[in-house]
Image (cartoon, grey):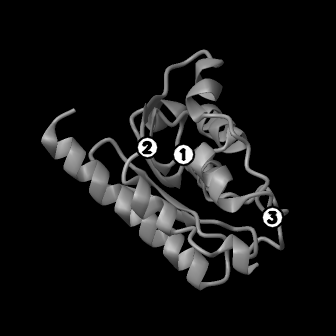
Amino acid sequence: MTAVLEDRDLALLRRAFDIARKARETGDHPFGCLLAGPDGEVLMEQGNGYTAEGQDMTAHAERLLCTRASKRWRPDFLAGCTMYTSAEPCAMCSGAVYWSGIGRVVFGQTERDLKEQTGDHEENPTLDLPCRDVFAAGQRHIEVVGPLLEDEAAQLQADFWSSK
């Protein structure tokens, strides 16, 4: 990976962190993601929708973004796009990435670390199943970059789950 791509990846990942902060500030779970086109242009952003969607346990930021993206673009275009997400996509969200056709994922915090940090919280019963394992079971390749900026990503969750 070139330095230009690394710089872009880090900048866009930090933008996903900003989306997660905004979700938290508005009373939702602190997760955020964005979809960037092949040229790095941000195409859409999505925060977690648990509260906004009426306590929908499936309203993860990544799943919501995949649904919106797959309604707007065909898989052949999405194959050249990258999802930047504050935390590694869970098994459900990894399935949504796979089915939408998104070709690349860049994430901050791992599912394993998130599970250790959130504990056994009823609103986030985290699965310790790496997205790479989900994608490997599929029939098409999805590039995965991460974890990156792990301390910054974990800070998004700091004290959130213990205060709920």
Q: Which of marks 1 and 2 is nearer the N terminus?
A: 1
Q: Do the residues labelled 1 and 2 touch (CB within 8 Å)?
A: yes
Q: Which image quarter: residue 158?
A: bottom right
Q: Which element type, helix, strand or loop, lies under badge 3?
A: loop
Q: Which of marks 1 and 3 is nearer the N terminus?
A: 1
Q: Residue furthest left?
A: 3
Up/down of 113 relative to 136, above or below: below
Q: Quadrant for the N terminus, please.
A: top left
Q: Which element type, helix, strand or loop, lies under badge 1?
A: loop
Asked whether residue 89 appears in the rendered view, the answer is no
Q: Looking at numbered disc 3 in the image, what kind of residue is underneath it? A: Glu
Residue 49: x percent and y percent? 69, 68
Q: Quadrant for the C terminus, please.
A: bottom right
Up/down of 5 relative to 162, above or below: above
Q: What residue would you read off at disc 2?
A: 147
Residue 143: x percent and y percent? 43, 29
Q: Looking at numbered disc 2 in the image, what kind of residue is underneath it? A: Pro
Calculate the distance from the C-alpha at mark 2 to the C-alpha at mark 3. 23 Å
Asked whether residue 53 appears in the rendered view, the answer is yes
Q: Which element type, helix, strand or loop, lies under badge 2?
A: loop
Q: Which of marks 2 and 3 is nearer the N terminus?
A: 3
Calculate the distance from the C-alpha at mark 1 to the C-alpha at mark 2. 6 Å
Q: What residue would you read off at disc 1?
A: 110
Q: What residue would you read off at disc 3?
A: 123
Q: Is residue 2 left or right of residue 130?
A: left
